[in-house]
């Protein structure tokens, strides 16, 4: 890492961009349970000192000082506190540098969920397996967006589902955009590629619920305790032959605004929320 002396000689705009990279590095170290570089705090203080002279950078200067102070403190601070300080500093620097963050700039989540029952108020991490709700699985039929597959995987894991089935026509769940959107959820699910007919043999007693326009409103449908939620292609929806099958129940999410459709990932979250509520 660059020395504070050399950092002082950099142009102000370069200092800001370099500070942004330092904050991101600190975040990555925290996510990997590693100690950030000892000189990082000193560099952030130098950047904050120069930013004080910029009327547009007062907020960024304050946030850089807060982050540097936290790093230098001998008190045990939770990872979530450091991460929040990093996030605020990064947002201020992005605004100053004219950086437009994209979804691939997001960092992976902490390896394990925090548990606040540890002594002295410091957070520890538990390796306990996640709890699951009743047997609700998802079947994705010909989804072409890796991002949507990753997003739905994350939603499924959040609602306690354990199985995700992909039709042969789905995009690769291991695509970088899918893995980025999933934020670690792919490893929490049992993922299998099967056709719907093959799935019927795997789970012959499961009720199949298809989320598509023109069906029973989700608020009026009696969701079963066990079942499979089917989500269709982003443009064409669920195959008509699937919807016509006698064992398939079609449900819809009522839209009351000028837009009559939802992103498939958003629709999955709404449907799982309704299903989770009745169970």
Image (cartoon, rainbow, N blue to C red):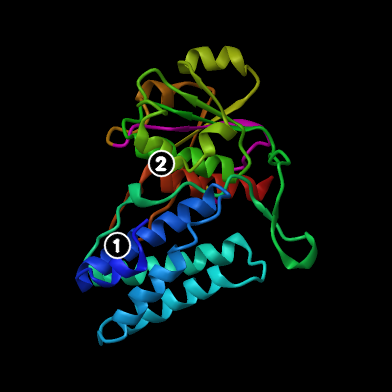
Inter-mark Cα distance, 1 to 2 = 24 Å
N-terminal of the pair, mark 1 or mark 2, is 1
Q: Residues within 10 Å of mark 2 (few under 14, many from 20)?
A: many
In magenta stretch: residue 228: yes
Name the image quarter holding residue 120: bottom right
Name the image quarter holding residue 51: bottom left
The magenta segment is 219-234
Front residue (pair 235, 87): 87
Q: Position of residue 133 (x, y in %)?
A: 69, 40
Front residue (pair 198, 7): 7
Tag 2, which secondary structure? helix
Tag 1, which secondary structure? helix
Q: Name the residue carrying label 1.
A: 18
Left or right side of 206 for 40? left
Q: Residue at x 66, y 48 (%)?
A: 278
Q: Residue at x 38, y 32 (%)?
A: 232
Q: Name the residue carrying label 2.
A: 180
Examine the rendering and report whether any part of residue 136 can be seen: yes
In magenta stretch: residue 232: yes
Front residue (pair 235, 27): 27
């Amino acid at each position: 890492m660059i020395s504070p002396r050399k950092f002082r000689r950099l142009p102000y705009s370069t200092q800001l961009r370099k500070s942004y990279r330092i904050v991101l590095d600190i975040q990555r170290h925290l996510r990997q349970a590693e100690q950030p570089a000892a000189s990082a705090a000193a560099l952030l203080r130098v950047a904050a000192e120069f930013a004080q002279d910029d009327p547009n950078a007062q907020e960024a200067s304050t946030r850089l000082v807060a982050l540097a102070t936290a790093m230098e403190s001998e008190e045990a601070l939770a990872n979530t506190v450091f991460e929040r300080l990093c996030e605020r500093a990064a947002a201020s620097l992005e605004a100053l540098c004219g950086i437009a963050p994209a979804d691939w700039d997001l960092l992976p989540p902490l390896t394990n969920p925090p548990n606040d029952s540890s002594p002295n108020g410091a957070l520890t991490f538990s390796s306990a397996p996640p709890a699951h709700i009743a047997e609700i699985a998802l079947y994705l039929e010909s989804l072409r967006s890796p991002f949507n597959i990753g997003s739905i995987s994350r939603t499924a894991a959040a609602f306690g589902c354990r199985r995700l089935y992909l039709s042969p026509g789905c995009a690769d769940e291991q695509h970088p955009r899918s893995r980025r959107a999933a934020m670690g959820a792919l490893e929490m699910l049992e993922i299998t590629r099967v056709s719907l007919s093959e799935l019927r043999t795997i789970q012959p007693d499961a009720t199949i619920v298809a989320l598509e326009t023109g069906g029973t409103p989700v608020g009026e449908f009696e969701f079963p305790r066990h079942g499979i939620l089917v989500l269709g292609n982003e443009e064409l929806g669920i195959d008509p032959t699937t919807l016509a099958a006698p064992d398939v129940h079609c449900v819809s999410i009522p839209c009351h605004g000028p837009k009559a459709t939802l992103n498939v990932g958003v629709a999955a979250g709404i449907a799982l929320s309704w299903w989770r509520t009745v169970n």
